[in-house]
């Protein structure tokens, strides 16, 4: 055996020794990493309690006698649509891919202590909980983890905005939900005038005059689906004369709309169907008054406001009318033929007398307007519809919205199309994305196809 052969054999032995000592054993080769598997079983039809805890607030919603009710932090009717959206998403919820087991990455997916704690209780008392984080790659995905686990998963079937809501978004904001087809008479008393619209012969009429559909639809749409912008849960200072609205449909509904200031951008709504006080914007009131041909009125201050709304067609005497700041006197049918023609005054144009044949409602209610009398509660320089107060008298809470005019202009309901973003939509209507967020009470600029956005375009 020559020298080179011996050297080759020695090298081979060294290599074998290296392989033997450094390669893992068969036992070690059998060990492999297993992705943790989690199952979240949710029967949305059996859920009777929903608890949503966020950093600074907690909301509990319970099904009480078949009616969803907010029980914490106050007791109020829950928004059935908001609850239905959440339950519908939970019924489709599926656990997707495993994202991370590193606790340091929980903050990245917002499933740490800043995440939303969601707890669901069914009829049997079983509780399913999870910590919900930010929205996933698509609108129907969220990042989540179980409370006692460090593993983060991607869940599919539910939107993050269906869970992360403010308290007022969980509450029922519907003031009226009455199909316009069921309405047959609407009475609006504003200032010193009353307008009575009746549905006769397939058309809406003001007296004998047919009201055009384009003029009547804003009023019908506003009253058939009136939603509050916010709630007033404390005692309100109702110091201005309201716009009184009475609706005859399947039932009788009365509304009083109180301005929050003399030339207000917001109105307090008092309804005969609820003890809750609501807040709506001036645009909604403008839609209601559109067929009357009157702009949003500037209401005089009154000393006392009745706690319960009174229908606008209540019959009063002359003496009572003066005591109540010249509220219009409504004469019943049987007195129409007895009153002298010279005493009957039309409400179509303030201060202009017309014969009885030209009054607003010759068939039923006749408005008897007396000469304007000075109101002892109002300064002598003011009329029944005083001008707006100086800017420095405007409540601070409303200064910004009135000065900027963010809620003025033509309202557009934009349906988001595929590929559109909040930025492109804002650019399309020449507004800012921040304004769209404010008008729609949104926290994120994320939008999804089919979502409706309220946008005020410039005049």
Image (cartoon, helix red, strand yellow):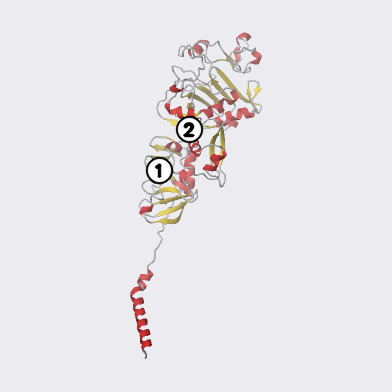
Mark 1 crowd level (few <14, some 14–19, many ≥20, 10 Å Cα): some
Q: Looking at the rendering, which quadrant does residue 360 occupy?
A: top right
Q: Are marks 1 and 2 in contact (CB under 8 Å)?
A: no
349 vs 317, left or right, is: right
Q: Is residue 274 visible?
A: no
Which of the 4 image quarters holds residue 8?
Answer: bottom left
Answer yes or no: is residue 198 visible. Answer: yes
Question: Disc 1 marks which residue?
Answer: 52
Residue 211 drawn at (x, y percent): 64, 25
Front residue of this view, candidates 364 and 319: 319
For numbered disc 2, what is the local secondary structure?
loop
Q: Nearer the viewer, residue 144 or 205?
A: 144
For label 2, the residue is 229
Position of residue 227 measured from the top left corner of the image (x, y, whole percent): 50, 33
In the image, residue 15 sits, relative to residue 300, either above or below, namely below
Count of picture labels: 2
Task: Nearest to the eye among marks 1 and 2: give it.
Answer: 2
Q: Residues within 10 Å of mark 2 (few under 14, many from 20)?
A: some
Does 12 sit above or below residue 189?
below
Quadrant in which the C terminus is drawn: top right
- The Cα–Cα distance between marks 1 and 2, rounded to whole angstroms, is 22 Å
Query: Where is residue 87 drawn, in percent x and y?
Result: 47, 45
Judged from this view, the residue extending furthest toward the bottom is 1
For the residue pair 449 and 158, the one nearer the viewer reads as 449
Circle on res. 141: none
Residue that sits furthest to the front in the current view: 3
In primary-sequence order, the first of circles 1 and 2 is 1
Up/down of 365 relative to 438, above or below: above
Q: Can you say which quadrant of the picture contains the N terminus?
A: bottom left
- The answer to whether residue 324 is left or right of residue 112 is right
Tag 1 secondary structure: strand
x, y percent for residue 396: 42, 27
């Amino acid at each position: 055996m020559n020298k080179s052969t011996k050297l080759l054999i020695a090298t081979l032995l060294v290599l074998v020794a290296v392989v033997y000592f450094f390669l893992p054993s068969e036992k070690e080769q059998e060990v492999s990493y297993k992705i943790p598997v989690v199952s979240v079983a949710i029967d949305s039809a059996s859920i009777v309690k929903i608890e949503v805890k966020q950093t600074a607030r907690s909301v509990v919603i319970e099904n009480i006698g078949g009616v969803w009710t907010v029980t914490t932090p106050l007791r109020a009717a829950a928004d059935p649509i908001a609850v239905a959206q959440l339950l519908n998403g939970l019924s489709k919820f599926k656990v997707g891919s495993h994202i991370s087991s590193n606790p340091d990455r929980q903050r990245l997916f917002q499933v740490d202590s800043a995440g939303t704690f969601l707890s669901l209780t069914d009829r049997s008392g079983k509780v399913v909980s999870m910590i919900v984080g930010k929205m996933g790659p698509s609108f129907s995905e969220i990042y989540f983890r179980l409370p006692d686990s460090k593993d983060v998963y991607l869940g599919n079937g539910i939107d993050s905005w269906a869970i992360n809501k403010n308290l007022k978004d969980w509450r029922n904001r519907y003031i009226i939900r009455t199909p316009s087809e069921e309405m047959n008479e609407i009475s609006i008393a504003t200032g010193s005038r009353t307008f009575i619209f009746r549905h006769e012969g397939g058309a809406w009429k003001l007296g004998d005059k047919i009201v055009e559909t384009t003029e009547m639809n804003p009023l019908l749409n506003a009253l058939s689906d009136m939603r509050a912008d916010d709630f007033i849960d404390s005692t309100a200072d109702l110091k201005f004369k309201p716009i009184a609205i009475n609706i005859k449909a399947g039932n009788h509904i009365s509304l009083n709309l109180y301005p929050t200031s003399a030339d207000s951008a917001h109105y307090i709504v008092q309804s005969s169907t609820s003890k809750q006080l609501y807040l709506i914007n001036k645009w909604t009131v403008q839609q209601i008054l559109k067929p009357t041909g009157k702009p949003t009125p500037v209401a005089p201050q009154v000393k006392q406001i009745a706690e319960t709304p009174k229908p606008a067609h209540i019959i009063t005497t002359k003496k009572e009318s003066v005591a109540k700041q010249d509220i219009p006197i409504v004469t019943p049918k049987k007195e129409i033929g007895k009153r002298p023609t010279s005493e009957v005054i039309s409400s179509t144009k303030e201060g202009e007398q017309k014969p009885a044949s030209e009054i607003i409602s010759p068939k039923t209610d006749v408005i008897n307007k007396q000469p304007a009398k000075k109101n002892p509660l109002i300064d002598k320089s003011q009329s029944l519809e005083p001008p707006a107060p100086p800017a420095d008298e405007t409540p601070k809470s409303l200064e910004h919205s009135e000065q900027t005019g963010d809620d003025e202009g033509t309202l557009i309901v934009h349906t988001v199309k595929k590929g559109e973003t909040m930025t492109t939509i804002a650019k399309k209507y020449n507004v800012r994305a921040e304004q769209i967020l404010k008008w729609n009470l949104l926290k994120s600029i994320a939008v999804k196809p089919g979502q409706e956005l309220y946008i005020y375009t410039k005049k």
